[in-house]
Image: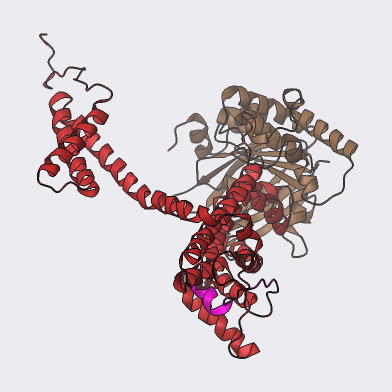
Chain colours: A brown, B red
């Protein structure tokens, strides 16, 4: 199940600080959308606002709309906990639960929500999720070992497996490869290409080659000056953004002639 | 070796003189021996003076020797190392001698009778502390049952729910103030409270437990708070991102991750209150018989038992002193046992690295 996301006039604040200014964009299902831009321009903030994770921070709030297949996620009647069950997230640093084994980490989303699941169903879910994250062959003999004993790249794929185990509609990835070596990065990028068959994938990255390699559309964020809110400068097919951008700022950033 | 580089730095050899491996120990022995000899000549040789003067002589001689052979930097390094080691030994001294004294004097009465008899109808030799051991376990156990939930939930509120609110600042302030309350004040508070409710002069184990809770809650709050803050935010976010509600995240992710530290903190806070004498003196009181009902009548506890055995000895005095030391040793053993259990639990639940 893959769903379309629309951001309508989205403004994001941290207390009095206006972090992101009026973003309008449509994120297509069954595709990879990359957010690029310099540090502090609000791309992670926009990403976190899509599954209402940013309001975990004290004083953060948004104005505007985030529509998931037409349903406004910021409607008063919407429960953020339910939103996050539909929109999964993978973080910059791999964060498997240290008290749990590999198997328990995969089942965390199910077990922590107190859903009853039979032993055979659980086994199937673990295998299916780990296969989905290209990790099954590496860990199938040590499912009861702690997840924190894996390498960084394996931990990150474990986190992806954990996120897809709750079968979300959308998968948000906040710089998922920035703490990983090139081999692990390649494994994750291959995985992202497979994941887009099933999910809407949104990825924040500092690595422009990565954005060019994995994404179908690219959004470039920037801020005019320090202390100003971040803005969406340009959004379009990755091909166009990288070869023939409309905006001068985009071209400068892509070609590295930028701050 | 002629150096023909253009560098203006003085050429420095990469090798330097080195003292043989056991120089320091040999020097220490020599220094202490010389000091003992010289002080004996003046008739001033006592263990304390020999050790202090010998240690100073050792430091000076070692500094001079090392400075001459190894250079001034190494000499300073040795100096710092010996001074640090010396202070460590000084700090260790009272601890070791305390344990040694307690074991030496307490072992005499560590017999079956001590652990199976109370002081009922005992006026001289014999008797035991079974009533006080039960009293200590009951009073401390109830204090723990009261303090751990209150402290735990207060800490959870402070770390997970309060944010930067005024209520949290107020709670933190009062917890800090409570940490500094003298234990006798906690005892008088509990005594007054129970006198007010049940009439003056009421002694009971439960009143003692209330007094100990007043002392225990702040330490539990503080240590649990520290432990919860150590749990990385990333784990909370990972849990939220799976659509897990906040309270389940706390119960299933945050608390298990911090469990080892929380258990250690709780054990330490129990150890802090289990030896309290003053508050129990005024609340639980003393009795010579076994009383396992915390809600009525005085209840003996180990610290108060030790206090009374030592302060009001009968004739002959020695059995009383022996019982006092045995009581003190029992108290230390209970605390050590608690620590061992705490460590076992901490080790069992500690996050595994799996490497």
| x, y percent for residue B219 | 52, 63
Nearest the viewer among B211 and A156 is B211
The segment highlighted magenta reads B278-293
| x, y percent for residue B68 | 12, 26
> Does the segment drawn in magenta span residue B291?
yes
Give the position of the N terminus of chain A as an image quadrant. top right
Residue furthest out toward the top = B1
Q: Determine the image quadrant of residue A31.
A: top right
Main secondary structure found in the magenta portion: loop
Give the position of the C terminus of chain A as an image quadrant. top left
Residue A158 in the image: above or below residue B102: above
On the rendered structure, is B168 left or right of A259?
right
Q: Residue at x 86, y 34 (%)?
A: A124
Nearest the viewer among B18 and A235 is B18
| x, y percent for residue B75 | 19, 32
> Does the segment drawn in magenta span residue A115?
no
């Amino acid at each position: 199940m893959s769903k379309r996301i629309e951001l309508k006039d989205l403004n994001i604040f941290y207390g009095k600080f206006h972090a992101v200014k009026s973003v309008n964009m449509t994120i297509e299902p069954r595709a990879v959308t990359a957010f690029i831009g310099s540090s502090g321009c609000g791309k992670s903030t926009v990403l976190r606002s899509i599954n209402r994770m940013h309001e975990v921070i004290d004083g953060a709030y948004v104005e505007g709309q985030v529509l998931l297949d037409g349903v406004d996620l910021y409607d008063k009647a919407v429960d953020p906990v339910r939103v996050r069950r539909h929109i999964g997230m993978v973080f910059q640093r791999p964060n498997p639960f240290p008290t749990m084994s590999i198997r328990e980490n995969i089942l965390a989303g199910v077990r922590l929500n107190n859903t009853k699941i039979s032993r055979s169903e659980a086994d199937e879910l673990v295998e299916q999720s780990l296969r989905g994250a290209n990790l099954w062959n590496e860990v199938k003999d040590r499912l009861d070992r702690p997840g924190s004993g894996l390498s960084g790249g394996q931990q990150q794929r474990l986190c992806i497996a954990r996120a897809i185990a709750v079968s979300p509609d959308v998968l948000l990835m906040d710089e998922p490869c920035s703490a990983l070596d090139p081999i692990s990065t390649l494994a994750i990028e291959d995985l992202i290409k497979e994941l887009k068959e099933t999910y809407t994938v949104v990825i924040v990255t500092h690595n422009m080659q990565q954005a060019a390699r994995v994404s179908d559309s690219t959004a470039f964020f920037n801020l005019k000056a320090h202390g100003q809110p971040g803005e969406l400068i340009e959004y379009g097919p990755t091909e166009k953004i990288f070869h023939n951008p409309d905006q001068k700022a985009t071209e400068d950033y892509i070609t590295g002639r930028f701050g | 070796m002629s150096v023909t580089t253009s560098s203006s730095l003085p050429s420095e050899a990469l090798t330097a003189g080195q003292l043989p491996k056991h120089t320091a120990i040999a020097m220490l022995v020599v220094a202490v021996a010389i000091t003992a000899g010289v002080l004996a000549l003046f008739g001033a040789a006592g263990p304390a003076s020999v050790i202090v003067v010998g240690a100073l002589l050792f430091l000076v001689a070692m500094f001079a020797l090392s400075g001459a052979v190894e250079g001034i930097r190494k000499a300073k390094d040795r100096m710092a190392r010996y001074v640090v080691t010396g202070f460590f030994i000084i700090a260790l001294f009272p601890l070791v001698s305390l344990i040694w004294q307690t074991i030496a004097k307490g072992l005499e009465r560590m017999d079956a009778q001590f652990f199976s008899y109370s002081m009922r109808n005992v006026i001289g030799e014999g008797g035991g502390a079974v009533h006080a051991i039960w009293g200590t376990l009951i009073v401390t156990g109830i204090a723990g049952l009261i303090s751990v939930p209150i402290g735990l939930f207060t800490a959870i509120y402070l770390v997970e729910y309060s944010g930067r609110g005024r209520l949290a600042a107020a709670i933190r302030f009062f917890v800090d103030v409570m940490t500094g309350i003298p234990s006798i004040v906690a005892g008088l508070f509990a005594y007054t409270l129970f006198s007010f409710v049940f009439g003056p002069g009421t002694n009971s184990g439960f009143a003692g437990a209330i007094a100990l809770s007043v002392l225990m809650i702040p330490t539990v709050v503080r240590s649990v708070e520290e432990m919860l803050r150590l749990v990385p935010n990333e784990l909370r976010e990972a849990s939220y991102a799976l659509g897990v509600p906040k309270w389940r995240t706390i119960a299933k992710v945050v608390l298990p991750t911090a469990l080892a530290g929380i258990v250690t903190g709780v054990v330490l806070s129990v150890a802090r209150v289990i030896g309290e004498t003053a508050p129990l003196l005024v609340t639980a009181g003393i009795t010579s018989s076994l009383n396992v009902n915390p809600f009525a009548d005085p209840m003996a506890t180990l610290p108060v038992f030790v206090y009374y055995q030592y302060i009001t000895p009968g004739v002959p005095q020695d059995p009383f002193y022996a019982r006092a030391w045995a009581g003190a040793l029992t108290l230390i053993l209970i605390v050590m046992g608690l620590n061992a259990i705490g460590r076992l639990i901490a080790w069992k639940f500690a996050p595994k690295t799996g490497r």
